[in-house]
Amino acid sequence: MIFTALLIASLGVAQSLPILDTNVKDGYIISASQTGYVLSKAPYDPGIVGVVTDNPAMLIRVKNKEGVHPVSSSGIVSVYVSSDGGPIKKDDLITSSKKAGVGMKATETGFVLGTALEDCSSTPGVEGVGGSCGKIKVALNMRYAVSAKSAGKIGKSLKDAFSLSTIAALERPSDVFKYVFSGGLVLVSIALGVLIFGRSATLGVEALGRNPRASFKITMGIVMNVAITVAIIIGSLGVTYFILLS
């Protein structure tokens, strides 16, 4: 692995990635697909991996291959943007758009590339891309962002929660399994405890009706069953706690 220092045009570390598209330029947004790395072509693409950066502060290069380009996933880089999402102002969130490799202002809930550090200028844009503003500086921080418009809307919030859980399941399946297993263990233990308590209480009442003189022993039996139920629930919570800590 080679660390190559270049003339700095962006503040970030880039890695060499093989990109399937041929018309790749500095400032294009790259996404991961089922076939490989490609120019991003969908708004709020959750597969975004970074931006092509010809002159990063540092380049991690494995070997020279045809179609390989330096792609930055952190730092400050220049990104091609369009006005498809509306005028871009400093501090606006930037996401991908329908135009291959070109970003736009994020106005909806979804996956974003980062934050604009300057307004959209009138510099001529990419050839063949209408409504382009050229390149602007963007602080990369790829994440799922909830828009202000969807805040407080129950249906939209549920959709956002589902999207977040789906992304989490894809990115960290072991953690998702851990939480699901822990939640299932707690639910099963509570259900088992309620079942044991309900059964013991019913049998105790019936026994008291048949033999009132043995009330003390029957009551102690019910108390013991309640203690066992509580112990089962506390034990499951303890096991769940250690699973979540692991």
Image (cartoon, grey):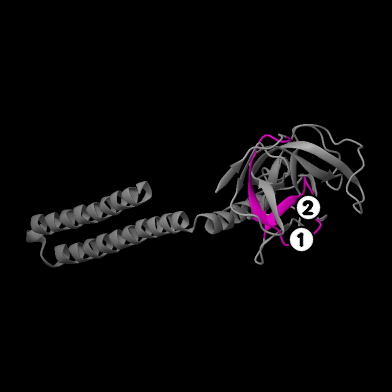
In this view, the residue farthest toward the left is 213
* Chain-order first, disc 1 or disc 2: 1
Residue 198: quarter of image: bottom left
Q: Nearer the viewer, mark 1 or mark 2?
A: 1
What percent of the width, then of the height, locates residue 116?
A: 75, 36
**Callout 2: 10 Å neighbours few (<14), some, many (20+)?**
many
Task: In the rendered view, tell whether residue 74 sits above or below residue 195.
Answer: above
Query: Which residues are the magenta region?
Result: 9-32
Q: Which residue is mark 1?
A: 21
Q: Say which residue appears at 58% left-offset and 42% top-offset.
A: 3
Numbered circle sitting on residue 63: none
Closer to the camera, 159 or 120?
120
Residue pictured at 9% horizontal, 54% vertical: 216
* Residue 228 shows in this picture: yes
- Disc 1 and disc 2: Cα gap in Å? 10 Å
Q: Dot 1: within a 10 Å radius of its alpha carbon, few (fewer than 14), some, or many (20 or more) residues?
A: few
Left or right, 183 with reference to 154:
left
Relative depth, front residue between 215 and 119: 119
- What x and y, as percent, mark residue 100? 80, 56
The magenta stretch spans residue 190: no
Q: Secondary structure at mark 2?
A: loop
Give, as a three-letter code, the residue at label 1. Answer: Asp
Q: On the image, which quarter does residue 142 sit in?
A: top right
**Nearer to the camera, 169 or 39:** 39
The residue indicated by pointer 2 is 101
Local SS, label 1: loop
x and y, in percent, of residue 48 in the image: 67, 52
Q: Is residue 238 toward the left or the right of residue 11 in the image?
A: left
Residue 47 is at least partly visible in this image: no
236 vs 40, left or right, is left
Q: Amino acid at mark 2?
A: Gly
Contact, CB < 8 Å: mark 1 with mark 2?
yes
